[in-house]
Image (cartoon, grey):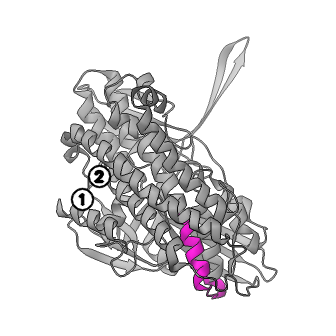
Amino acid sequence: MKAKVIVDPVTRIEGHARIVLEINDSGNVSSGHLQVLEIRGFEKLLEGMELFKLPLITGRICGVCPAAHHLASVTAIENGLKVKIPVDAKLLRELMYMGHILHSHALSTFVLTGPDVLVGIGAKPEDRSVLSLLNMAPEIVKKVLRLRSIGQRIVEIVGGRGVHPVTSVPGGQASRPDADEIAKMGQWGIEAGSLVKELSDVLAKKLENISDLREIVELPFHAVALSDNGKVTFSQNVCKVLDPSGEVERTFTVDEYSDNLVEHPMQGSYMRSVRLKSGTEEKKFFVGPLARLNVNSSFSTPEANKLLSDFRGGGSPRLSAIDYLEARLIELTYSAERIAEICGGELGDGPIITDASPAEGRFRGIVEAPRGILIHDYEADDEGKITSANLIVATQNNYDAIDFAITALAKHFKQSGDDNTLMNGAEFALRCFDPCLACATHAAGCMPMRIELRRNGKIFRELRREGK
């Protein structure tokens, strides 16, 4: 008799979700699926709002990746207005964003996914938490929190707020840090680089303990990421698509995204999947740190570039979901190096703002959020008010890959006969992708509904609507 194993709620992720594992008549896992249980409806909420307010409003979609939405929004507006911002404004935005990557990757690698690796997938749920890590290895946790704090403070100083930055405005930056603050952030960048090195050594040893799982969660999908002529970039650029064999299949710009990407409702979930258009077929893909390191062959900073060379030397492309953890460590190194470089002399005292005025038109922008490509697409009328909006969020792009990894690890751990390990393994597969669910939920009208009509506590009628 067929059955289900349900992990509800999934913990140590951003947002609310559950995992449903389908068990066949033989008692084996036949499939696994992530169901996202919340809807936010931000695209509809943006309609009627003033164009130039969107960088402030969209940054509030999420408390984990607000800087990504802030920059995707302001970039979209500047693209539509054909506004070129000053060099120092670009550097300030990059500085803020590198702080954001530090904060986000440190949170994911060591606080959310870290307990699975450092304590063990088979450990009891109450032992797989940052609080348990604090008891086991307090010095490691202190370094993690310091790294995260450095990133958050940089966002606060450059962006005006630590959680929801406000200083990136159409045309450039509204303000700049003073010389003392820039010098201080430069020192923090150097400190962050040392912390990342120490923490990477600890995590790398623990990753060896689960090396047997790598092949199990190899993703047979395309990789999609921004590329600056082969260099890793987080800002507006060309999107490159790499097939599983490592060949470049195509490139496209943000203006061409709707010709290349298509969204689909998913059963029992408020989050849509995204697939590559390809003639009469569609292709599944993944995004994020692992995709960026597969699509690109270099970084602009020396230590990260060396680490990337070593990473790719182990076989390119790297396709295991577990490789996401190592990829984040390399990007942490890059972020620390860029912070030190920008504050150590690249940032000058030139202008940081140029004139920009609202106008009618279409506005599209793309950035690499910590979790992968993020697209903002707006249309505005002649009063500069939004008539429609579409957001394609990084975790949506990973939906198919997430379900694949959940299914693969669940099948593997089902053989152990231990339900705790089975559910832990399914959660770990999801956490490898560092899902951010709140900002990825906007698929209205797709969830199933069941209404029970009761009289004196007994059900006398049941109404159902099936999900699409």
Q: Quadrant of the rendered structure where residue 44 is? A: bottom right
Q: Is residue 243 magenta?
A: no
Q: Is residue 81 magenta?
A: yes
Q: Nearer the viewer, residue 192 or 423?
A: 192
Give the residue pinned by disc 1. 318
Question: Residue at position x 32%, y 43% from top?
Answer: 203
What amino acid is labelled 1 in the image? Arg
In the displayed structure image, the side of residue 434 where residue 59 appears, left or right: right
Q: Quadrant of the rendered structure where residue 427 is? A: top left
In the displayed structure image, the side of residue 373 where residue 309 appears, left or right: left
What amino acid is labelled 2 in the image? Asp
View extreme (right): residue = 383
CA neighbours of label 2 inside 10 A, class few (<14), some (14 to 19), many (20+): some
Residue 395 image offset from top left, x and y in percent: 48, 54
Question: Residue at position x 74%, y 66% from top?
Answer: 47
Give the residue pinned by disc 2. 323
Residue 14 image offset from top left, x and y in percent: 54, 44
- Can see residue 371? no
CA neighbours of label 1 inside 10 A, class few (<14), some (14 to 19), many (20+): many
Measure the C-alpha gap from mark 2 to mark 1.
7 Å
Magenta stretch, residue numbers = 79-97
Mark 2, secondary structure of its residue: helix
Q: If the image is split into quadrants, where does the N terminus sit? A: top left
Mark 2–mark 1 CB contact (< 8 Å): yes
Question: Residue at position x 59%, y 82% from top?
Answer: 348
Q: Nearer the viewer, residue 271 or 184?
A: 184
Question: Residue at position x 78%, y 74% from top?
Answer: 385
In the displayed structure image, the side of residue 458 where residue 275 appears, left or right: left
Magenta part, dominant SS = helix
Q: Quadrant of the rendered structure where residue 365 is? A: bottom right
Q: Nearer the viewer, residue 360 or 460?
A: 360
Residue 226's tag is none
